[in-house]
């Protein structure tokens, strides 16, 4: 497959010797057992595996939402293990975008406010430029006319597109999507996945998607298969 | 974060209802207090200087000599006395305040409405309002006073007077001097007075008087503020609970914010600003509600009672500011703990499927601490009960009560759900599965259940404590009153025997249950060489008085006032001997001085020693329980116009009324706290319903009918409020027991601890019913959702 606008060989994120253990003694669960992985910049990567395989834990560690038991994570050239909670939060805010399966939007904010939220959290002034960018992204995703609505007034597909727009608005180094189509019907799923792929192609965005559906993974440039806490294979 | 803050406030405003109600009620109470105080002050101060227009100065609370000295020098006494007043036809009242009016123009400070001022003794003026309500007109004759000292006077004018100095009737000063108890509050002087008499010039005097009145009104205001603080405390509990629940429900939002890149500090700041905004708005609303209520109440009172000394309301800035700041601070303090919990929140929470909220019970540490505190508090109460000095004992018992209450609150998360489960399993026997579900629901989030119950616990504990304590005090006080005034109404002759017809006539008066003639004689007692004459009576064995009044032979029971006619220090004259003389017969008696109504009492045997032919000197009347003592006294007084009339029933009724007014005023003020707590219960239940939407849908899908679901919620509310009420009642009664045991030892020796069982049951029932009412709205909301809709809820 082809990448157009960005150099391909630098890693957007890298994990080395990643392990994650929950609990102690008899209840000990090894979610990750030594994972080495590189996420290519400007590519659409799918992390695939059955439930309980450790794929979500892997994503959480890569995104700086959770700390590994051992091993290193580097995102956008920044090692994460030495950052305290506030530094990690600011790092996420500046470098990482998220799209979740559900409960993606703040119910009290309109779609437009939800999209602008990461900028506001960062204390950035909402300028004409950022507003134009937010509008452009919203238009690209086909929700430009729905920005004044509350999430409860939008369909599931529309909500998910608002979430994607919000993740894109800060131009993050890497966008993580956790089962983004888990709650959607197949037609809407296809639309959302298509939007994710277009953001990679047209905006040069790096996207990592966690999914257990092969049909969703098919949209990706690279498929990382996870099983029992380690990587079984990488397909390009 | 501003967008988030405003959007949150808009979206969740309705869920803050209970918090707003709590703050508004407490703040409004403070403002209403200020409105009433300011109206009272301006009413009291209006025209306060009227009597002093021609005075050079004044002496407050002068002795008889000082009064006489300045009156002789052309001054004037502001005097008053409580006396029975009747017209030719009817009794106007047993205890009517009678003021003094001058025959000299410069001391005639009352404002003349019609007629003229008196020019000599035997003329009186009447307050224009009082004249209207009692149908008294110029030219009428009034009889003021009782027995020998009664005066007949003709109404010559109608007047108006500033509330501070006003009385319904004014007679001339020489006539008042014949009475036993003319009370001179102030004597005004025509010229400069002596420093030694504590004389002050008029300006200084008026300033001093206003300062004094200000203080007195303020003391009452501060007492009411105690209840505002109780309301604020309950508000803290309710608001803390509201925030805890709301934040639990919004955890996912907060987590999402964190995942989006909001720092902990940003989230914390946002919710604290939310609390601040809520506090500011609710306090502002409280000021508004308080001002409207304050003005409304004052206007209403003035409409209903024209003579009430209420002036204009002028709210004072310090009060408003303090109320506003207290309301806002309360909200902030209450939000502190729940917002702190947000610090533990991880952004990962946003990615997990909907999971249980923080439902951990209290830690072992809290429970152990609670148990120890409860035990310590209980021990302190028992120590206090054994304390010798009542004042110190009272302080210790207060500390003990506070400590015990704190301990019980700490134990709450274990105690309340446990009791709810217990009560629930009992209720399940009659109400079936809804009660079982309800008990389980109440136990699933022990801290929330305990916090909800705690807010009601405060009000119920205080209410039942006051009810029980006051019942004990009331019993003891009324027993004492019955001892002092055992005769409902006594007609007592002071010089000559009563006509034989009086007894029969008295028995025929409607409202009289029974009457008895009391034999007696006119006797004289030697005092310092000259004889003093006084009537003595020998109480017969009769059930007309509340207790057996027969006197031991050789003893004379006499009031200090009567004894003062022939002994030096009448209050300590018990045990002294006195010799009674009737004609050529004499008898020596030992004095027993105590407060009694009517003439000195001796035994029948002593009376036989004194006279062979005793005559009726008094008629004692027992009234029907429901009879109005004032009306009865009016009718009976006409039967023997020259006799002195002692109205024991009215005296007892008056004290009883005072006690009742005090008790119900306190209960009324506490009711504000109870209402706040009930709003809290409704809120907790309402928010829990939102939270459990999915679960209710599941239950409905599994076959729970709409009706059963409603009953489940009702049972939960009733169980919760009833448990809080029962625990509160137990605490209240226990605390009142501690307090009354101390009083029994020292201040009220005859008091016996006496919980008002019916009233206490009523408190528990009212709390239960109120719980039922509080669940109406939440359960309607819960049952409106169809199972399919509910299951789709996130």
Image: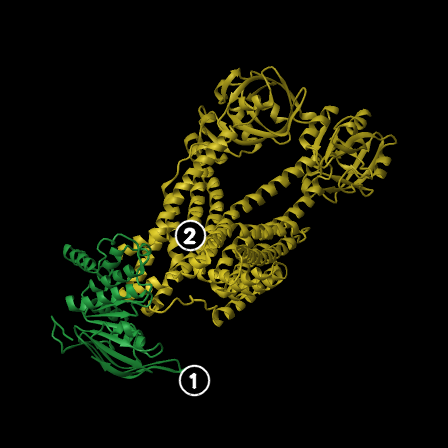
Chain colours: A green, B yellow
In the displayed orientation, state which residue is furthest to the front: A187
State the quadrant of the N terminus of chain B: bottom left
Q: Position of residue B401 (x, y in %)?
A: 55, 59
**Residues at marks 2 and 1, CA–CA distance in whole angstroms:** 46 Å
Asked if one can make out residue B486 in the rendered structure from this viewpoint, the answer is: yes
Residue mark closest to the camera, 2 vs 1: 1
Q: Position of residue A124 (x, y in %)?
A: 19, 59
In the displayed orientation, state which residue is furthest to the right: B612
Decide: few, some or many residues near mark 2? Use Cα within 10 Å; few <14, some 14-19, many ≥20: many
Q: Is residue B252 above or below residue B105?
A: below
| Of residues B212 and A188, the one drawn nearer to the viewer in this rendering | A188
Q: Position of residue A195 (x, y in %)?
A: 22, 65
Q: Are marks 2 and 1 on the same chain?
A: no
Q: Is residue B343 above or below residue B125?
A: below
Q: Position of residue A20 (x, y in %)?
A: 32, 80
| Of residues A64 and B586, the one drawn nearer to the viewer in this rendering | A64
Where residue B753 sits, quadrant-wise, is bottom right
Q: Which mark is residue A26?
A: 1
The chain under label 1 reads A
| Of residues B760 and A218, the one drawn nearer to the viewer in this rendering | A218
**Residue at point 11% right, 75% down?**
A7
The chain under label 2 reads B
Query: Are circles 2 and 1 on residues that touch, CB within 8 Å?
Result: no
Side (left or right) of B298 relative to B420: left
Decide: few, some or many residues near mark 1? Use Cα within 10 Å; few <14, some 14-19, many ≥20: few
State the quadrant of the C terminus of chain B: bottom left
User: Which residue lies under the disc numbered 2?
Assistant: B19
Q: Look at the numbered disc 2 and give the secondary structure of its residue.
A: helix
């Amino acid at each position: 497959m082809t990448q157009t606008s960005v150099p391909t060989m630098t890693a957007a994120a890298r994990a080395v010797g990643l392990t994650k253990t929950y609990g102690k003694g008899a209840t000990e669960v090894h979610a990750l057992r030594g994972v080495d992985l590189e996420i290519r910049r400007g590519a659409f990567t799918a992390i695939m595996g059955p439930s309980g395989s450790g794929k979500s834990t892997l994503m959480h560690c890569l995104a700086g939402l959770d700390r590994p038991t051992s091993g290193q994570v580097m995102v956008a050239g920044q090692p994460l293990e030495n950052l305290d909670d506030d530094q990690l939060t600011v790092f996420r805010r500046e470098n990482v975008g998220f799209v979740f399966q559900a409960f993606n939007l703040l119910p009290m904010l309109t779609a437009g406010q939800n999209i602008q939220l990461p900028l506001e959290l960062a204390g950035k002034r909402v300028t004409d430029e950022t507003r134009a960018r937010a509008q452009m992204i919203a238009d690209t995703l086909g929700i430009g006319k729905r920005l004044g609505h509350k999430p409860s007034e939008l369909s599931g597909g529309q909500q998910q597109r608002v979430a994607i727009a919000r993740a894109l608005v800060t131009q993050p180094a890497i966008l993580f999507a956790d089962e983004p189509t888990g709650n959607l019907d197949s037609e809407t799923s296809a639309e959302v996945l298509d939007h994710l792929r277009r953001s990679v192609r047209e905006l040069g965005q790096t996207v990592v998607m966690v999914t257990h559906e092969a049909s969703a993974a098919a949209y990706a440039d690279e498929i990382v298969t996870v099983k029992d806490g380690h990587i079984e294979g990488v397909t390009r | 974060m501003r967008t988030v803050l405003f959007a949150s406030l808009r979206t969740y405003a309705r869920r803050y209802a209970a918090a707003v109600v709590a703050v508004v009620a407490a703040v409004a109470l403070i403002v209403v207090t200020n409105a009433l105080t300011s109206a009272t002050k301006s009413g009291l101060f209006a025209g306060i200087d009227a009597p002093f227009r021609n005075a050079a100065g004044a002496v407050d609370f002068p002795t008889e000599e000082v009064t006489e000295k300045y009156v002789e020098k052309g001054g004037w006494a502001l005097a008053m006395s409580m006396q029975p007043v009747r017209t030719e036809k009817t009794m106007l009242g047993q205890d009517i305040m009678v003021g003094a009016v001058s025959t000299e123009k410069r001391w005639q400070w009352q404002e003349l409405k019609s007629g003229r001022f008196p020019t000599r003794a035997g003329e009186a003026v009447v307050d224009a309002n009082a004249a209207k309500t009692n149908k008294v007109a110029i030219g009428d004759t009034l009889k003021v006073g009782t027995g020998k000292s009664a005066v007949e006077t003709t109404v010559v004018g109608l007047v108006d007077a500033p509330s501070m100095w006003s009385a319904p009737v004014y007679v001339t000063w020489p006539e008042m001097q014949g009475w036993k108890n003319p009370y001179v509050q102030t004597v005004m002087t025509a010229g400069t007075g002596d420093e030694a008499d504590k004389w002050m010039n008029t300006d200084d005097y008026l300033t001093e008087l206003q300062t004094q009145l200000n203080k007195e009104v303020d003391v009452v205001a501060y007492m009411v503020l105690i209840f505002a603080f109780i309301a604020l405390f309950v508000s803290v509990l309710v608001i803390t609970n509201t925030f805890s629940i709301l934040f639990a429900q919004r955890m996912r939002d907060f987590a999402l914010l964190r995942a989006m890149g909001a720092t902990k500090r940003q989230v914390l700041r946002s919710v604290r600003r939310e609390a601040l905004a809520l506090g500011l708005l609710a306090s502002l609303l409280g000021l508004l509600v308080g001002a409207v209520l304050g003005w409304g109440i004052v206007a209403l009172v003035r409409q209903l009672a024209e003579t009430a000394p209420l002036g204009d309301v002028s709210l004072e800035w310090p009060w408003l500011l303090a109320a506003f700041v207290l309301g806002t601070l309360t909200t902030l303090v209450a939000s502190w703990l729940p917002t702190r919990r947000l610090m533990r929140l991880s952004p990962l929470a946003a990615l997990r499927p909907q999971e249980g909220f923080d439902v951990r019970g209290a830690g072992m540490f809290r429970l152990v601490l609670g148990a120890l505190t409860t035990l310590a508090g209980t021990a302190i109460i028992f120590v206090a009960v054994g304390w010798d000095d009542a004042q110190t004992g009272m302080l210790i018992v207060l500390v003990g009560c506070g400590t015990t209450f704190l301990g019980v609150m700490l134990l709450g998360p274990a105690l309340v759900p446990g009791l709810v489960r217990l009560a629930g399993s009992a209720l399940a026997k009659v109400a079936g599965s809804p009660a079982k579900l309800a008990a389980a629901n109440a136990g699933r989030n022990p801290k929330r259940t305990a916090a909800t119950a705690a807010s009601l616990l405060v009000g119920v504990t205080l209410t039942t404590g006051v009810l029980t304590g006051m019942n004990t005090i009331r019993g003891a006080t009324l027993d004492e009153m019955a001892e002092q005034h055992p005769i409902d109404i006594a007609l007592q002759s002071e010089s000559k025997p009563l006509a034989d017809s009086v007894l029969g006539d008295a028995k025929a008066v409607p409202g009289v249950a029974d009457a008895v003639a009391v034999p007696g004689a006119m006797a004289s007692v030697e005092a310092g060489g000259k004889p003093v004459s006084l009537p003595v009576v020998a109480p017969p064995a009769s059930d007309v008085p509340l207790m057996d009044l027969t006197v031991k032979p050789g003893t004379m029971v006499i009031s200090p006032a009567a004894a003062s006619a022939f002994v030096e220090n009448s209050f300590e004259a018990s045990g002294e001997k006195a010799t009674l003389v009737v004609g050529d017969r004499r008898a020596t008696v030992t004095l027993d001085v105590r407060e009694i109504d009517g003439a000195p009492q001796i035994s029948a045997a002593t009376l036989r020693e004194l006279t062979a032919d005793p005559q009726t000197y008094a008629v004692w009347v027992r009234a029907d329980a429901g009879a109005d003592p004032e009306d009865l006294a009016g009718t009976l007084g006409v039967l023997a116009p020259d006799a002195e009339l002692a109205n024991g029933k009215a005296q007892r009724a008056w004290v009883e009324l005072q006690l009742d007014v005090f008790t119900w005023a306190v209960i009324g003020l506490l009711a504000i706290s109870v209402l706040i707590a009930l709003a809290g219960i409704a809120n907790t239940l309402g928010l829990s319903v939102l939270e459990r939407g999915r679960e209710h849908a599941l239950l409905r899908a599994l076959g729970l009918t709409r009706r059963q679901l409603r009953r489940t919620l009702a049972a939960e509310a009733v169980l919760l409020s009833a448990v809080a009420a029962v625990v509160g009642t137990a605490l209240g009664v226990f605390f009142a027991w501690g307090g009354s045991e101390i009083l029994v030892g020292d201040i009220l020796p005859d008091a016996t601890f006496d919980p008002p069982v019916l009233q206490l049951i009523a408190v528990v029932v009212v709390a239960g019913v109120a719980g039922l009412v509080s669940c109406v709205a939440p359960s309607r909301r819960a049952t409106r959702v169809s199972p399919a809709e509910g299951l789709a809820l996130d």
